[in-house]
Image (spheres, rainbow, N blue to C red):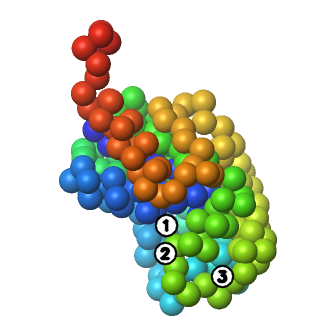
Amino acid sequence: MNFAIAGLTASGKTYQARRLAQNLGLEYISGSNILLDIAGLRPSEDLFWISSNGIQFAEARTNDHSLDRRVDELLLSMAKSKNDLIFDSITLPWLYQGNDLVRIYLGANPQARALISLGSRDVMPYSLEELRELIRIKDEHTLKLFKEMYGITIGDTSSFDFVIDNSHLSKDETSQALSRFVASIAQPSPLVKR
């Protein structure tokens, strides 16, 4: 079985996917890291995706979808051919057609995502207001890109197996909720017939 965690920038998907991978002994696959590798980028900024360079890269991708298509093809190929993977990917849960992918969405609101980003680093070069604005700009590019490419409305969670609004949860509380969900599908209740 494979898992995919989706969510907008700074929703906590990378942290949660890595933690779940470690706890379950799964291989962690980052769509963002694959994208950066294919683009030949080695960002020095810790907060690349909301930096001016990251936002310029996101804007350029709205005009040229080729990098994103290559990444999505690789992710789809991996999801079809391997097991025991956990993907940190914005698009895979919508693009993958099989029932053997558990789809998880982290739906933190913009204020919470700015706070998640602020609290995830010891040194933060941005204020909370600046983070909110940078995340808003990055979201605009992300939403536009995948709507144009695939007709995906990021945030439409109707095909997801588990949706958690982690706006008011700590990262540990979010991890606990995800662990309970995963345990429930790994060992279903004896009252549930399959």
Which quarter of the figure is the C terminus placed in? top left
173 with respect to 107 (left or right): left
Q: In the image, which disc is placed on residue 51?
A: 3
Mark 3, Cα crowd under 10 Å, few <14 / some 14-19 / many 20+, is some
Q: Position of residue 27 (x, y in %)?
A: 26, 57
* Distance between the alpha carbons at the discs numbered 1 and 2: 6 Å
Looking at the image, which residue is at 56% across and 72% down?
119
96 with respect to 81 (left or right): right
Looking at the image, which residue is at 49% across and 66% down?
32
* Distance between the alpha carbons at the discs numbered 1 and 3: 15 Å
User: Which amino acid type is shown beneath numbered disc 2?
Assistant: Leu
The local secondary structure at tag 2 comes to: helix
Q: Residue 193 is drawn in which quadrant?
A: top left
Looking at the image, which residue is at 49% across and 75% down?
36
Q: In the image, which disc is placed on residue 93?
A: none
Q: Position of residue 139 (x, y in %)?
A: 71, 61
Q: Residue 131 is drawn in which quadrant?
A: bottom right
Is the residue 66 above or below the residue 51 in the image?
A: above
> Which residue bears the numbered disc 2?
36
